[in-house]
Amino acid sequence: MSSEEAKPAGPDLTSGIPLTELADGGKILGRAGDESVLLVRKGEEIFAIGAICTHYSGPLAEGLVVGDTIRCPWHHACFSLHSGKALRAPALNPVSRWRVARRDGIVFVEEKIEETPPARLSSPGLPGSVIIVGGGAAGNAAAEALRNEGFGGKVTMLSADQSGPYDRPNLSKAYLAGSAEEDWIPLRSPDFYETNGIELKLNTIVGSLDSGRKRLLLSDGTELSYDALLLATGAEPVRLDIPGANFPHVHYLRTLADSRAIIAKAKTARRAVVLGASFIGLEVAASLRARNIEVDIAAPEKTPMAQILGPEAGNFIRALHEGHGVRFHLGTMAQSISADAVTLNNGERLDADLIVIGAGVRPSVELAERAGLAIDRGVLVNEYLAASAPGVFAAGDIARWPDKLTGERIRIEHFVVAERQGQTAARNILGAREKFDAAPFFWTEQYDVAIAYVGHAAGWDMAGIDGSFDARDCMISYYRGGKKLAVATIGRDLASLEAEAEFERAMATA
């Protein structure tokens, strides 16, 4: 039973609880009617908010209070205690709020507070129109943030995808495994965009950008003008140039259409080969095993994910998959593909009627590059996510920004990072001058194991391991030159949140 379906636990907060039971900084999970409510005390202030995260229904009672926010333990969504507003993705919807009263040392939760939408803003200092190129995580989050901030001008989202914005992480996880219905996948319904005045154009290719004239030329010849522009064009899979790579049973996984195609083939497939041991490749393997398909993984590295997580974690991941029947072929690559097999460069032949290639992605920077924007393995942006041309911002997989924690420019291909950058870029389009200083976060789920990773360590000289992989209770801290840069956890959600808060404090003083 999910958290949403479960009956509310804890005391009836409408009947009151003694204030002495709620310590400063403490939380009490209770109920108001048939809804779960979380009481949080910060000094003399007491807040009553919905206890269920609006992203994947995570239990906020097990989360972390940071300042006047509460963070979800599962995927680090962040909510304001004052307003209930979702301040940081992946949650996009607010949590509910209730009025709180204190009488004679007793705290009572009273009526729910009805939220009112923000008044639409319009002033000479704001852009009249904003165009977002890209309909993925960053683009969708930016469009929503513009409206949530009260922007009253025109918002247009141009997406090359045939589907509206969707929950991309699920494409290789629960949806591919068959445990999530397709109606879980869209981030919003089509009605949402119409109701909020967001013009969403699908199957739309932008041919060129003239940043001096503030014009976009679409592939069909249509010309659009803008006052502010957000480039959120994402990334494309790296495609293998080997014989047979274009056979119909060979698939890549990036879009909803890609996932649908793999699912359709999986209904009749018996043996699959996954080329690549990236997180996507490993998640695909786990999802195909959930469908009782035999799976082989071939990859050039000696240990899966060792470059990102270290050899100990990599060996744990390999053993996890092998325990579910996956066969690894490491230190080798595909040489050719036939109608019923993959031949590796060591001569080994793997039977397959389904092949999924996960050889990484590359940022889609062609539009920005042709427009003359500054490029260096991505679109260069400053701490406000502004690109080198006036009125142009970039977010998501294409953005390379100055990271305070590492002291380097970094580019990260994570869904949550893309959403958070979209939100920050939107506020800066409206003049906020808000630095992007969120600690990068991502998660992977493989079988019944979830790994959370916060921070960024492209390289490290020491990895400290606390706990046990076998017990699925551990934390790995990655250091370079004695400075902690990232933390990975298994079974330690609170520790992951604490690491995020630690990194935020470090960046605030950098």
Image: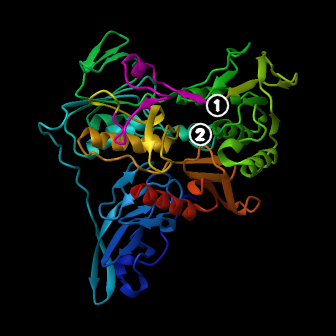
The quarter of the displayed image where residue 28 is located = bottom left
**Residue that numbered label 1 is attached to:** 263
Vertically, is 60 above or below 346?
A: below
The quarter of the displayed image where residue 348 is located = top right
Give the magenta-colored segment's residue range. 360-386
Q: Is 365 within the magenta?
A: yes
Quadrant the N terminus occupies: bottom right
Q: Residue furthest bottom?
A: 104
Q: Residue furthest front?
A: 481
Q: Nearer the viewer, residue 319 or 403?
A: 403
Estimate how packed mark 1 is, as few (under 14), some (14 to 19) or many (20 or more) residues with alpha carbons within 10 Å: some
**What is the chief secondary structure element of the magenta stretch?**
loop
Estimate how packed mark 2 is, as few (under 14), some (14 to 19) or many (20 or more) residues with alpha carbons within 10 Å: many
**Residue that numbered label 2 is attached to:** 175
- Mark number, residue 383: none
> Quick check: marks 2 and 1 in contact, CB under 8 Å?
yes
Could you say where residue 101 lies in the image, as x and y percent from the top left?
A: 27, 78
| Number of numbered markers | 2
